[in-house]
Amino acid sequence: MSGLEIMGLVMLVAMIGVIFIGFPISFTLLFLGLSFGVVGLGTSQTFNLASLQIWGLMKDEVLPAVPLFIFMGFMTEQAGLMERLFRAFRGLLETIPGALYLAVILTATVFAMATGIVGAAVTVLGIMAGPIMIKAGYDPRMSSGAIAAGGTLGILIPPSVMLVVMGPTMGVPVNQLYAASFGPGILLAAMYIVYTLLRSFANPRLGPTVPMDERVGDWGLKLREVFFGMVPLGCLIGFTLGTILGGLATPTEASAAGAFGATLLALAYRKLTWTALKNAAISTMATSSMVLFLAAASNVFGAIFTKFGTASVITNTLLGLPFPPMIVLIIVMVLIFILGWPFEWPAIILVFLPIFLPVVAKLDLGIGTKSEQMIWFGALVAVNLQTAFLSPPVAMSAYYLKNVVPQWSLSTIYRGMADFMVIQCICLAVVLFLPDVAMWLPRALR
């Protein structure tokens, strides 16, 4: 290895070490990238690279969809649509063992199609379902796992903000990435439902029926809740997600229309107050600035890292392993899974994923064209990264849930999430060895 290649490796190790200490990821990437760049490449070349990367990011036509989708999610939450949806499912399923598990997962699945954010979904589900689950005598471990796992479906099921960021990073169309992630997302939700149902029917004490004093009873009221809880949200989902998958609108255009539609729904439900609008706007700015600033910092870091030549060394090392292509791909997925424990998805997609992309691009995996292979790989990464929200020590879903349901200890929440992580790993294996689970929809839409 040359001196620059060794310097790039030192920079990568330093980045991981400094982030583990607790320094903010964005500032760490920017500081290390510029510092090592000045030493290895010189001041002029380093700052030219940085300015070109930041300018190129600013001209990206897809990334404006990030704040719009985030605003759409927060405004949908402010409109109270998630509460209506939960009440609708709870009323329909109230006589079935494990009804509240089903209501939580179904609500999370439908709501994931209307928002690409996770924190709000886990928080609202915890507020709505946590107290009634405790009152009904539901198992705390399974209850916390269902809420945390269901709430994270928003990063996998379109219109996921994570997929919007992943598309430009991988150089694949976002609508194709959406289509490829839709099948695995629905499969994962179905596996959650089957797991909770089987355990509830086998042992009704884990998930009894809804208590009599919490039941709706009146079918007229139930149908009214179902209509007002599902139809408006379904129209919003169909308008935004349908136009993207059908190729009728770009993600940016559809996200703008979705944000406007969510605002109209809040107005129609008489929830569009100045406070609600301000809260949604502030939350959108906070989340968007974190993601987009990290994108800028990682682009600078990645450009300098690539200029050092260390990325090529890593690529050639992985390709030189004496294993079949599928084994190399499994090694890559294991590395991404391990990275998901200390890092959140933005850091993995923007920093580490570009290192693995050349490796996967050169593997002959027999998944149609190279473009189809990269889209399938994107779906695999999306399923894999969902575990980042359920794996300690980061596991942000645990902290979101603990804040709104203090009766459940963090250890209980962690154990509950671990059960659902096993289901996620099974789903990942299914998508890995049965590529059609992810690729049937992208191929059908062509």
Image (cartoon, rainbow, N blue to C red):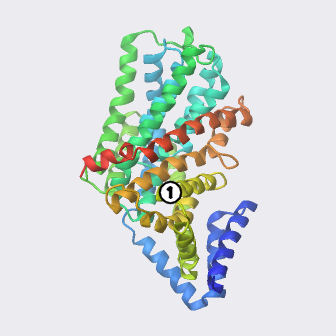
Q: Is residue 239 above or below residue 61?
A: above
Residue 152 in the image: x percent, y percent? 53, 42
Query: Residue 251 versus residue 256: which sits nearer the camera?
Result: 251
Against 231, residue 44 (above or below) is below
Residue 324 percent coordinates (x, y): 49, 58
Residue at position x 63%, y 20% from top? 138
Element on which disc 1 rests: helix
Of the 4 image quadrants, the one containing the N terminus is bottom right
Q: Is residue 124 above or below residue 261?
A: above
State whether residue 84 is above or below residue 253. above
Q: What amino acid is at disc 1?
A: Leu
Query: Which residue matches tag 1?
Result: 329
- Is residue 114 something one can see in this rendering? no
Where residue 92 appears, as percent x and y from the top left, is: 42, 17
Report the side of 246 relative to 39 (left or right). left
Residue 234 showing in the rendered view: yes
> What residue lies at 50% left-to-right and 81% top-to-bottom?
51
**Of all residues shown, which one is farthest toward the right?**
21
- How many marks do you count on the picture? 1
Q: Residue 312: image x %, image y %?
A: 53, 75
Q: Residue at x 36, y 55 (%)?
A: 367
Question: Between residues 234 and 304, which one lies in front from this camera angle?
Answer: 304
- Number of other residues with Cα within 10 Å of mark 1, as a class: few under 14, some 14 to 19, many 20 or more: many
Instruction: Identify which residue, 238 or 75, lies in the foreground.
Output: 238
In which image quadrant can residue 73 be found?
top left
Question: Which residue lies at the image location 69% right of the left edge and 69% below the top edge?
Answer: 13
